[in-house]
Amino acid sequence: MLKKYLFCLVCIPFFSASAQNDIMGFTTEHTTQETSLEETFKSKISAQNMEEWMKIMTDRPHYVGTQKGKENAEWMLKQFKSWGYDAQIDTYHVLFPYPKTRVLELTAPTKYTAKLEAVPVEGDAYTQQGEALLPSYNAFSKDGDVEAELVYVNYGVPDDYKQLEKMGIDVKGKIVIAKYYGSWRGIKPKLAAEKGAIGCIIYSDPKDDGYVRGDVYPKGAFKNKTGVQRGSVMDMPLYPGDVLTPGYAATKDAKRLDRKEAPTITKIPVLPISYEDAQPLLEALEGQVAPSSWRGGLPITYHIGPGPAKVHLKLEFNWDLKPAYDVIAKLKGSTYPDEWVMRGNHHDAWVHGAADPISGMVALLEEARVMGELAKAGKGPKRSVVYCAWDAEEPGLIGSTEWVEDHQEDLKEKAVAYINTDGNGRGFLGVGGSHMLQEMVKEVAQHVQDPQTGVSVAARKIAEEQVDGKEGVFKLSALGSGSDYTPFIQHTGVPSLNLGFGGEDSGGEYHTIFDTYTYYKRFKDPDFAYGVALSQTAGIITLRLANADILPFEFKSWYTTVSGYLDEIMKETEKMRKETEKHNKLVADNAYKLASDPKEPFVAPKKEVEVPFMDFAPLQNAMSALKETVNNFDYKAMKELTGAKKDKLNQQLMGLEQVLLNKDGLPRRPWFKHEIYAPGFYTGYGVKTLPGVREAIEQKNWEEAQEQIKVLAETLTAYNNALKNVAAL
Amino acid sequence: MLKKYLFCLVCIPFFSASAQNDIMGFTTEHTTQETSLEETFKSKISAQNMEEWMKIMTDRPHYVGTQKGKENAEWMLKQFKSWGYDAQIDTYHVLFPYPKTRVLELTAPTKYTAKLEAVPVEGDAYTQQGEALLPSYNAFSKDGDVEAELVYVNYGVPDDYKQLEKMGIDVKGKIVIAKYYGSWRGIKPKLAAEKGAIGCIIYSDPKDDGYVRGDVYPKGAFKNKTGVQRGSVMDMPLYPGDVLTPGYAATKDAKRLDRKEAPTITKIPVLPISYEDAQPLLEALEGQVAPSSWRGGLPITYHIGPGPAKVHLKLEFNWDLKPAYDVIAKLKGSTYPDEWVMRGNHHDAWVHGAADPISGMVALLEEARVMGELAKAGKGPKRSVVYCAWDAEEPGLIGSTEWVEDHQEDLKEKAVAYINTDGNGRGFLGVGGSHMLQEMVKEVAQHVQDPQTGVSVAARKIAEEQVDGKEGVFKLSALGSGSDYTPFIQHTGVPSLNLGFGGEDSGGEYHTIFDTYTYYKRFKDPDFAYGVALSQTAGIITLRLANADILPFEFKSWYTTVSGYLDEIMKETEKMRKETEKHNKLVADNAYKLASDPKEPFVAPKKEVEVPFMDFAPLQNAMSALKETVNNFDYKAMKELTGAKKDKLNQQLMGLEQVLLNKDGLPRRPWFKHEIYAPGFYTGYGVKTLPGVREAIEQKNWEEAQEQIKVLAETLTAYNNALKNVAAL
């Protein structure tokens, strides 16, 4: 009786703690320590520090090569050192174009010269810094001097060109004008050039982030008529980073491509403008009226052209090498100094960049400060923690990419994970990343409090999704591109995360002169409460990865997610087959012609090649094998390992994401090596999961699709074998 | 062998002709005659006549009570008589308000006085007729003088008020401003008054029919900044026709309601305005920003208010009785003079009304001219054909309603069907109507040529639907309201059709001073080719109904359609149940609160009453019995009847639609008696099928829904019995 009772005493708490309270990857004993540490960590995060530092870092523009950029890097270096970090600045020498000549004129049927002017706003002194404000331009537009008829191409994405083709409109030899949004901006000149256009103008339509959305700055948060979004148009889906040193670091003496041969500089000149400058151009267009979904918010009838509007676009840049200063600060791990948990945010901005990127940067700094303070108190991380403040993210993820290219071997051997942040604001937690991290992130998100509602940031996110009619389950999105995680995950196979808060901070300030501290205080995260939430979320993720007994990687969610991607592709293929059949029947029946308005131009649609039945079996078999492996995975047994076996297990876990790389990379873009996640070749930032297979199918390249199925199946089989090796331990 | 061969000779042609070539309701012999007659009829229709007559009838405004309206009626009378018709003018004396005072001012925070002006357009002399042009107003707005804060209510339909409630905005004591479209206009002041508003402004947003859609008049077809849509706001879903004589004819000496008690005059003053006049009002609103789907095309941020915009609205009308002149022209049937095939179109317009209604009116006239010519040549109809040119349709279907109310007994005994047309234009055939006419209309539509493509108007319509992703089957839509068929079908149970062409004639001219001959020639149907197609389609339908041996009514399509309505309602109820459950769970979980922006006003949603399981069995049983009856219907045997039996059969067929009436009418609106089709109580023109049941469920009046299921099941059972009686013959 007693014995039995004793048994229960020992046993019940053990199982219940294990089932309910152990942190993933932590023993029960270490769970207690870690929980206490995390509570301390959370309590020390200060909103006041963030605000103070934002003011310091955003008092002047600090784009690549500016004195202010350098000062920021040096100031951060000093901070890191003062917090006990082993910190340094790694400098790369990267091509950074600065606009020398910007001319845009309507030359027919009437005249208009675009103002291209940054107009200061009353009540926001930052916008009154005159020439210090970087002129609006798209970095990595080529130089050019062109004049041609104008064509309005909506967002300038592939579907828009399909629509133009249906309407019998060709952009060959024309200059196109596209709206921002709908894709990453770099896709617009890339596609336009592929279609034969000789110039590209991008403007911000008031429907997307101007007065249609809400009151404009300074009355409200949205884009006023003079606001212009700057931004890179480098062909990042090919490779990001310095355009002259693809795949290797842009060190001082690196061998460089001739600029004329750099494949990621645009093929045609491209310039961003405000809606005030766009309106006279659009108003001068005639020809067919734009389809209803193409119409923006200007008080005009949107015509497509071509012409009679004719424009002259002249652009010249200074093409100089500029130093990019990456600040790298390491807190050495007490137990596993050669296992690195990496945490980064960029520090360069297009102008002042209060939101983008300083709101994320100061959250990272505050996190690092507290981490340093804990270390000084003897509560330092078991694994090394590496904080990175990247330069030159804006022109094309350059600072991070060069650093990652420079440290390939170290990273492949030592990196546990990379946790990225960027701009931050008020609202809901959004996290994208490697799906083997999903359950760990969910656990963390359940233990960080949302500052406005008092529930966890996970619960608030789930409520939002439920009200939106979605499932209401905490999930990671897949990573495409758009911030510094790209070289880590897609080039190097480091498990990565990207996180931030937002959704209640909408506005039109992105990459404009209005992204200032003054604006941030009014519209983004006035009391830095979500800065605190970000520090806490990213910080605890960092802490858990740094202190875990066994790295908290989980494979059932990974399997379910990837399996979902495969289902999606198979369903899409079926849908494509049915749509093609339907389309071909309508062509055969002459239905398109009969349904068309005889007074409008009509281009007879052609029959499309029928979608063949693809052999998905290699993928299905590989996934089936993986299912068995992940179902049999014994996380509990893993936690019972000790000593060398445990170390070896962690080493093997660290290498797993790399198994998902293909050393030859994706077709036509070898820099991108990840077989599960990539930015879309024609979406830019937008992710394409299982990209080799998916993009081949989308492009109707059936032969390549079948090849890529084989390649991916081999990768998945290799991953299964690696997982089985882990399980065997 | 010979015998067998002879048998075949007789037999094969008979069956094959019967299966493939006989016109519905015609014997093989009569099919040949009818086909030849129809070819002659089609060949005689003249576009030139239509154009000439349109010029005559639209040279000045001809709204109710004008000299020009009277002249048009008298001119048509003369025409009908010259074509051999027994024609007369039936005059009713109907209340018709004419605007005496129209004041709309923004009184705070800034001042603006609405122009409310008809602005002439260069190149269109009709628009330059100054004071002859009827001032813009909404007929049957009450007189009023109100001043209050303004609230923007989107389209002012029930869903919009639900949204306002969610946002914590009350219109009580306010003046609302609603956009045209989204429902029949009369719903807007009706709902606004129900919600406590004291005034209503309706404007045409450029997104709906102005510059967002296309170039504006005179450059293009869409509404320019001064265009105002006139129109009735009488509460027609209660009863149409003269507001003072509900349910009986407005003869000279009829007993009339006191105007103050007339239930179909609005409860609050209402005025339509242009977008030029609306913009200063909308711009002066503050408060929450309108949800994205509410935003129009003006270059402003749409705020909802209330206030600070305050407006003063003062309206006074002359409330006089005016004569309404219905022209009724009969061509006596050779065989069945007491069976009437009725064909109508209205002749009154808000201003010149080239499209609405004269494009349909002249097609009717041309049809009648040829019909008369054929009769003179000995090829007159077997049944009587009655052509009607209605007056006073625009203010509320008044001319037709009074006439129908005046001729209830005759119609119930003699009317075979009523075929309505109204405005017409270039494009695709659209037909709504009693579903027992569907197959007949389909047959006709397969034998009228589309003037632009050369295929049949049925084939073109089907191609359009297929390209739109629909089924591609020729179907009749269900009739709600909006033209003169309403008193025929919904009050009297006369099988009705409404038809017209359109879809390639979009513009913003509807009920404005721009609906002129000049405009029509440029944008609607420049060569009157679709006028010809309309004359041919409506004319052949009329001819077939007039000459058929057995009336070409068909019940399988009817059954399938009505059965589809029932399925729809049952599915909607299930959907409502699931949505209510989901909503209540979200309320219980506090998800709405958690997902809401704490900086925006939040109104906690309440749990909703759960949707009970309704007993649909009486309807399912009634439909099941009907299915058997219609499946056993022997159309072939029917055609073999002769003499008195045949006559009796036709008499019984004529009475069938009346069996679908409920003598007590629909709940709270006894004038509307049809149990299958009605205009929605809160949609106006928009149809509600099986309206008793459907609207009770939509309004969550479960008790009434269950009662109405019983009522409808009884009606359907009576219909089944009537059908069985027909079959028994």
Image (cartoon, coloured by chain):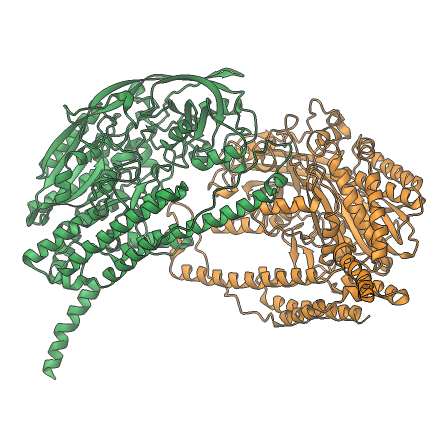
Chain colours: A green, B orange
**In this picture, is A660 found above or below B713?**
above
Identify which residue is drawn at 61% across, 47% down.
B465
Q: Quadrant of residue A246?
A: top left
Q: Nearer the viewer, residue B152 or B438?
A: B438
Q: Quadrant of residue B409?
A: bottom right
Q: Is residue A229 left or right of residue B358?
A: left
Look at the image and tell me in which quarter the N terminus of chain A lies: bottom left
Q: Nearer the viewer, residue A325 or B703?
A: A325
Q: Quadrant of residue A675?
A: top left
Residue A502 visible within the image: no
Q: Nearer the viewer, residue B608 or A197?
A: A197
Most extreme residue toward the front, as rendered? Answer: B1
Most extreme residue toward the bottom, as rendered? Answer: A1
Q: Is residue A128 left or right of residue B433?
A: left
Q: Nearer the viewer, residue B6 or A149?
A: B6
Q: Is residue A617 left or right of residue A651?
A: right
Q: Position of residue B338 (x, y in %)?
A: 90, 57
Q: So how many labels did they put on this image?
A: 0
**In this picture, is A701 found above or below A60?**
below
Identify which residue is drawn at 83% across, 58% down.
B27
Q: Position of residue B557 (x, y in %)?
A: 69, 60
Look at the image and tell me in which quarter the C terminus of chain A lies: bottom left
Q: Position of residue A619 (x, y in %)?
A: 31, 53
Q: Is residue A676 left or right of residue A378?
A: right
Residue A134 visible within the image: yes
Q: Position of residue A502 (x, y in %)?
A: 33, 43
